[in-house]
Image (tube, rainbow, N blue to C red):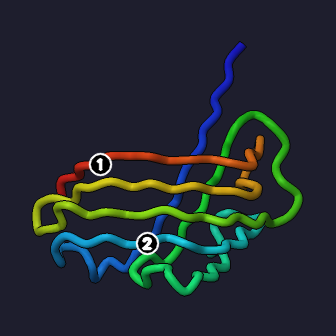
Amino acid sequence: MFDNSSLCFNLRFDTALLGAGPATFVIDVAVEVPLLSWFEPTFTPDEIHSPGVRAVWAQTACYGPIQEDGVSQDVTGALELRVNDATRFAGHLVLDVSGTSSGQCATHKARADVEFDIAR
């Protein structure tokens, strides 16, 4: 039997911040993800949310039924950029998602804890 399942954490931030040096961004939002995932989610930040993060949500994929409606998620965490210069983008991302993920085979709780180092 073949199963190809995935869980993706989507994060969009202000690209004007690329190369601006180290920074930490607090993430605390409510998100409404529409049925069609290529549409922008409705993003409602809490008062402590850092404005550099423009959208964040979780999405699943598998061989299963597609959701019939949009979904709601609460997302908290932090994006820490330890290196943010002309050649590298490196740091740590922690996200906790509660609510229904968008896509097939929905989950109701997900966590990401990722170290990253990306050449630019």
103, 106: nearer the viewer = 106
Q: Residue at the spot x=63%, y=82% of the render?
A: 44
> Where does the image place residue 68, in percent across and percent down from the top left?
88, 58
Return the x and y of residue 82 as percentages of the image width and height. 20, 61
> What's the amino acid at mark 1?
Phe
The residue to which callout 2 is attached is 26
Q: Which mark is residue 116?
A: 1
The residue drawn where x is 77% and y is 41% is 105
Which image quadrant: the N terminus?
top right
- The residue nearer to you, when weighing 101 against 26, is 26
Left or right placement of residue 35 versus residue 117 in this view: right
How many residues crowd mark 1 within 10 Å: few (<14), some (14–19), many (20+)?
Answer: few
Residue 11 drawn above or below residue 47 = above
> Residue 114 in the image: x percent, y percent?
39, 46
Q: Is residue 2 above or below residue 116?
A: above
User: Residue 62, located in which quarter of the rendered image?
Assistant: top right
The mark nearer the N terminus, 1 or 2, is 2
Q: Amino acid at mark 2?
A: Val
Q: Check if mark 1's residue and mark 2's residue have beta carbons within 8 Å.
A: no
Q: CA distance from mark 1 to mark 2?
A: 17 Å
Residue at horizontal 50 percent and vertical 47 percent from the top:
112
**Which of the 4 image quarters holds residue 28?**
bottom right
